[in-house]
Amino acid sequence: MSRRRRAPGQGQLSLLEQCLDERGRAVLAFAAAQPYQGGVAGRVQAELGCGELRYTRELAALLDRPEAADAQPALVAALRALRDRRRRLRTPPPPTTSRSVAPRGRAARS
C-alpha cells in the first residue's frame, strides 16, 4: 500500500485544527452553512444526529476553544459577537447607585 504525499499547504490541517475533533469540525461546518437564526432542529437531527439543544451547547462550547477560532476564524468571531450581543440584550443593566437624600423638615424626625 503506497501513500501519496500531499503538497505543502494543500489539504492539510493546522496543528490546532488537528486538535479539533471530527465532531467539532462537523458542528462548525453546519453552523457556517446555516443562517444565524433559530429553526434548525430538523436539519440538526438529519445532519448531526442530535437535537437542537445539544447542537447549541456544543457550538457554544466550541466558540471558547482556540482550535475553533483557528479552524474558522471569521465564523467564530461572528458567532461570538452574536452571542455577546444577545447576552447583553438578555441581561438587565445593573441598578444605578444614586445617593439618597434624607427628607428635610418635621417628617424626617420620628
Image (tube, rainbow, N blue to C red):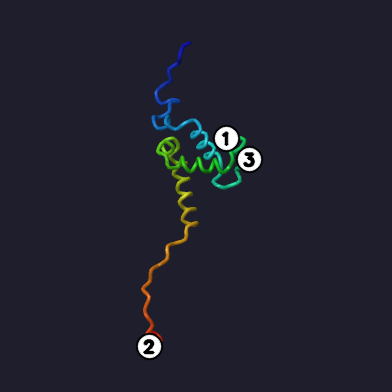
Residue at the disc numbered 1: 48
Which residue: 38% across, 82% down? 103
- Place of residue 3 in the rendered image (x, y in percent of width and height, measured from the top left): 45, 14
* Mark closest to the chain's N terminus, 3 or 2: 3
Q: Nearer the viewer, residue 30 or 97?
A: 97
| Element class at badge 2 | loop
Which residue: 45% across, 46% down? 80
Q: Which mark is residue 8?
A: none
**Which amino acid is tagged 1?**
Leu
Question: What residue occupies the far top of the structure in this picture?
Answer: 1
| Element class at badge 1 | helix
Q: Nearer the viewer, residue 110 or 62?
A: 110
**Disc 2/disc 1 C-alpha distance (Å):** 71 Å
Q: Which mark is residue 105?
A: 2
Q: Is residue 1 above or below residue 75?
A: above
**Disc 3/disc 2 C-alpha distance (Å):** 68 Å
Residue at the disc numbered 3: 42
| Element class at badge 3 | helix
Task: Say whether marks 2 and 1 touch (CB < 8 Å).
Answer: no
Which residue: 58% across, 47% down? 38
Task: Look at the image and tell me in which quarter the C terminus lies.
Answer: bottom left
Residue 34 is drawn in which quadrant?
Answer: top right
**Disc 1/disc 3 C-alpha distance (Å):** 10 Å
**Which amino acid is tagged 2?**
Gly
